Amino acid sequence: MQAIEQWCYQAYLKLQRKVNRVSIKTLSVQEGSISYLEGGQGESVVLLHGFGADKDNWAPLCGYLSKHYKVIVPDIPGFGGSYMPESGFSILEQVKRIERFISAKGLTEYRVIGNSYGGYLAALLASRNSANVTQLTLINPLGVEKTEYTQVFQDILKGESPLLLPKNKSDLKALIAKCFVKPPFIPGFALSCMLRRAKSQCQVHEQLFYTTHKFNDGHIQFDYPLEELLAQTPVQTLTVWGAKDDILSVVGLATLRTLNNSHLQFECMENSGHLLHMESPKALFTLLTKQ
């Protein structure tokens, strides 16, 4: 049964990639192999997915971007089809891994788009490589310290198991429901395969999660608060947030709006949740092309 589900899932992904003009590739770096999607021509755009997600989450947006840009979409080490780090789970170590991937690809100038955990990575990446990053887009980014906590993080602060680390299909369905205003249809075989992969990678994911989020006296702290990173960034940056995000509160956008930096732009998308690139790819693409 599992073999049949896996075959169906791979066929499903292959079709999605073909429709959205990207193909799967692998690249060896210092620690192991990185799986990534690539497609289109022109200026390079690197897309970084969120926690527990993978490169294929970007396929709907790639369908628009690949008509105008060369899109490069890695599975961040620790997720998807890329290698599992044995140590070094901090946000800085993860950014260094992405830098090694970008270097191996031979990229010297590129745009970066990141969602959630990937947005936090993207912001630190841009701050360390401002001479190379031509534009930065953050979609519902992690890393804002001065914000409100959604129920998802309130539960974690109470000591409950993170919904972001699903242990069964019920958890996975609940997480998906939290990520969208209108959750997309996901075939049962796809859910089963997604859950099996999450379980197989759970130890690394737990290390990454608790190293990234510092839970301290009812608050969440970060090694590099996003407010501080963006206050000093010299890169043109667009931050877009879904007004109905049930994972990371849109209050984070209000916090970032107070920063005094002329390089920063902000947009709020009504009736959208945490994964704008999947839920509203056309509207998001329209915003990106206005930068």
Image: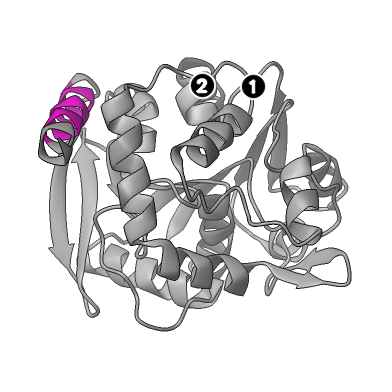
Q: For mark 2, what is the residue? A: 279
Residue 49 drawn at (x, y percent): 44, 47
In this picture, which residue range is highlighted in magenta? 7-18
Closer to us: 184 or 277: 184
Q: Quadrant of residue 231?
A: bottom right
Q: Residue at x 81, y 58 (%)?
A: 158
Residue 269 drawn at (x, y percent): 68, 22
In the image, farthest residue toward the bottom: 87
Q: Residue at x 53, y 24 (%)?
A: 284
Closer to us: 97 or 41: 97
Instruction: Tell me the number on the disc at residue 272.
Output: 1
> Coloured how?
one colour
Q: Residues within 10 Å of mark 2 (few under 14, many from 20)?
A: many
Regarding mark 2 in the picture, which secondary structure is present there? helix
Regarding mark 1 in the picture, which secondary structure is present there? loop
Q: Which quarter of the rendering shows the N terminus?
A: top left
Spatial separation of the CA atoms under disc 2 and disc 1? 7 Å
Three-letter amino acid code at the position of disc 2:
Glu
Magenta run includes residue 12: yes
In the displayed structure image, the side of residue 82 where residue 7 appears, left or right: left
Q: Residue at x 23, y 24 (%)?
A: 16
